[in-house]
Image (cartoon, rainbow, N blue to C red):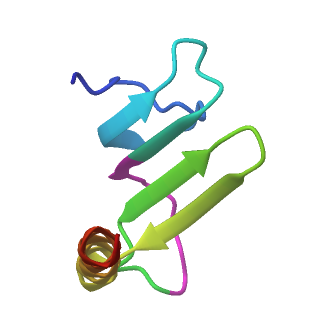
Amino acid sequence: MLCRKECPKGTTCKPVSNVVDDTGTTFVCIGYHDELKKEHTQDKFRHCFRSLETDSVFDYDLYDLKSVIAVMSEALLVEEVMS
């Protein structure tokens, strides 16, 4: 799947990977953002998720990103084992 080169939210964030519906209304995306922050300057990854009912933005550092991936992977495994 090809990653859209532009930010689905229309910001200056530079996408690394995303999945966007044909209309651009719903998507999940992760990229590098260039916002200057006084706190948590290490949080260079931005994760955005938009559905018909949700619009969320999270900033992560590398440890945060690995932790989220680990928790989601375990949830998928547990779901498969428990089904």
* Residue 72 in view of the camera: yes
- Relative to 21, say whether 62 is above or below: below
Q: In which quarter of the image is the N terminus?
A: top left
- Relative to 38, say whether 11 is above or below: above
- Relative to 58, say whether 8 is above or below: above
Q: Residue placed at 27% from the left, 68% from the top?
A: 80
Residue 75 image-quadrant placement? bottom left
Residue 72: image location, x then y, percent: 34, 72
Farthest right residue in view: 53
Farthest front residue in view: 83
* Residue 12 in view of the camera: no
Residue 77: image location, x then y, percent: 23, 73
Q: Examine the structure image and report whether residue 27 is included in the region drawn in magenta.
A: no
Q: Examine the structure image and report whether residue 31 is included in the region drawn in magenta.
A: yes
In this rendering, position of residue 59 left or right of residue 76:
right
Magenta span of residues = 30-39
- Relative to 40, say whether 35 is above or below: above
Taken as a whole, is the magenta stretch helix, strand or loop? loop
